[in-house]
Image (spheres, rainbow, N blue to C red):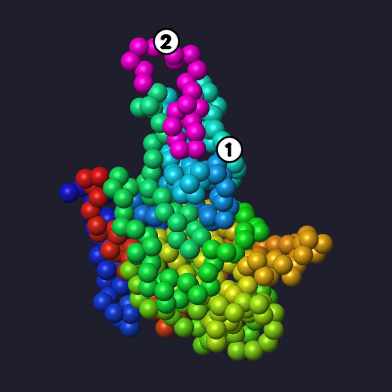
């Protein structure tokens, strides 16, 4: 075994030890997990190039030819709505000499034309034109389509996987989360109103961990989220699950944000005032409230840098109340609120990364940080699963 393996083995043992076998005995992950290049390489291989990665929301790809072009673990990918309503996803790389085809972002196209030599593909990835190749011998257009990758939709989100073999279906992995917690909100009907990206000077896992615990809310978000009056004791952790984690908080009183619209009759009892925070492992974060949905896809950019692609969506009954005339002002206010919340989180996420450069001790979880332990146990399991052969 070489030194790289020794380093990784040492870190994985430390992680196993910190995770213990039960939450009550567990401790936060050792700092090396956030700083080691070897761990980062293992994450690229075992997580980002293998697991289901969220590219955005289904409602933003509603019509035939609507697409999103993005990058997963540095690999350009493309998801396109088909004529029959299904999605196909591809490597966003030309079959000629592999130039990236579509520019990153959302759009709608009947045909995808490579900017290099104009090879042209339809929405199904079939090569329909290869200029000046007509007279070549042994050139069969049908063997030069875009390379398909795995795609699946869950609750109004689009996911792809770069794995050589299709991972187990995401919908099956998330059955408990859907049936017991988030399904009642029907979040697929929420309409995207803001989409943006935020760079953060931290490891991607620092952002995940900050998002999935609400212990920090009463301190860090005193001016934003905490104004709804919830305290740490108002939060409850969901069940331990293999592929996701969640917790939620219920408003005890007051009016305004995080409460179901009067015309929403699907949400009952306390759920009308409950906000759920979810991580679909490894890197998709969701805050789901009766009146808004905040989604973040966390993309590593090396060990100590990342990008948070985030969006906000709201249910149609809330949008209906806003109306066309008031929309610009309403949107500016929502935007201001989200910017303030992001500005509150960013420095603490970056502080987490600096602080773990050398771990000062064993640390300790508060009971409402159980979601972090769920995440750490998932990482331990995935890091150990051997994919060297693929
Ligand atoms: S690389 Fe796309 S047409 Fe040549
Ligand atoms: Fe936060």
Residue 160, image x and y in percent?
42, 50
* Numbered circle sitting on residue 109: 1
Residue drawn at point x = 53 percent, y = 73 percent? 185
Q: Residue at x 27, y 55 (%)?
A: 7
In the displayed structure, 292 sits above or below 119; it is below
Residue 158, above or below 229: above
- State the residue in front, 232 or 313: 313
SS label for mark 2: loop
| 289 and 45: which is toward the camera | 289
Front-most of 374 and 347?
A: 374
The residue positioned farthest toward the front in the image shown = 84
CA–CA distance between discs 1 and 2?
A: 28 Å
> Is residue 304 visible in the rendered structure shown here?
no
Among the 4 quarters of the image, the one containing residue 198: bottom right
Q: Quadrant of residue 94?
A: top left
The x and y percentages for residue 133 are: 44, 15
Q: Which mark is residue 73?
A: none
The residue lying at 59 percent from left, 79 percent from top is: 265
Residue picked out by circle 2 = 135
Outermost residue toward the left in this view: 1
Span of residues in magenta: 120-140
Residue 17 visible, this angle: yes
Q: Main secondary structure of the magenta part?
A: loop
Label 2 crowd (10 A; few <14 / some 14-19 / many >=20): few
To which quarter of the image does residue 321 belong?
Answer: bottom right
Q: Which mark sits nearer the N-terminus, 1 or 2?
A: 1
Residue 285, how many percent across, how many down?
49, 64
């Amino acid at each position: 075994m070489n030194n790289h393996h020794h380093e990784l083995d040492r870190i994985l043992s430390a992680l196993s030890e910190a995770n213990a076998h039960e939450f009550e005995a567990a401790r936060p992950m050792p700092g090396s997990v956030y700083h080691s290049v070897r761990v980062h390489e293992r994450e690229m291989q075992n997580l980002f190039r293998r697991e289901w990665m969220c590219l955005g929301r289904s409602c933003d790809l509603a019509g035939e030819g609507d697409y999103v072009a993005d990058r997963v673990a540095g690999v350009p990918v493309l998801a396109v709505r088909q004529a029959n309503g299904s999605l196909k996803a591809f490597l966003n790389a030309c079959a000629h000499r592999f130039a990236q085809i579509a520019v990153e972002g959302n759009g709608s196209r009947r045909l995808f034309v490579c900017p290099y030599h104009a090879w042209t593909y339809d929405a199904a990835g079939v090569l329909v034109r290869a200029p000046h190749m007509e007279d070549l011998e042994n050139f069969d257009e049908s063997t030069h389509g875009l390379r398909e990758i795995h795609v699946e939709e869950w609750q109004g989100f689009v996911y792809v996987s770069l794995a050589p073999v299709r991972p187990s279906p995401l919908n099956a992995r998330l059955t408990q989360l859907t049936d017991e917690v988030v399904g009642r909100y029907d979040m697929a009907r929420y309409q995207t109103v803001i989409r943006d990206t935020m760079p953060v000077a931290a490891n991607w896992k620092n952002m995940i961990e900050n998002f999935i615990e609400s212990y920090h809310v009463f301190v860090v978000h005193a001016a934003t989220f905490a104004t709804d009056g919830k305290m740490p004791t108002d939060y409850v952790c969901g069940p331990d699950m293999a592929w996701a984690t969640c917790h939620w908080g219920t408003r005890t009183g007051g009016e305004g944000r995080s409460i179901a619209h009067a015309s929403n009759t699907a949400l009952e009892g306390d759920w009308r005032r409950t906000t759920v925070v979810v991580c679909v492992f490894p890197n998709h974060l969701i805050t789901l409230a009766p009146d808004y949905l905040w989604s973040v896809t966390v993309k590593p950019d090396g060990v100590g840098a990342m990008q948070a692609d985030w969006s906000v969506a709201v249910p149609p009954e809330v949008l209906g109340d806003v109306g066309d005339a008031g929309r610009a002002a309403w949107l500016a206010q929502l935007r201001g609120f989200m910017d303030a919340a992001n500005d509150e989180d960013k420095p603490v996420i970056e502080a987490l990364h600096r602080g773990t450069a050398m771990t000062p001790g064993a640390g300790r979880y508060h009971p409402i940080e159980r979601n972090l332990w769920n995440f750490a146990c998932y990482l331990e399991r995935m890091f150990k699963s051997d994919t060297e052969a693929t």
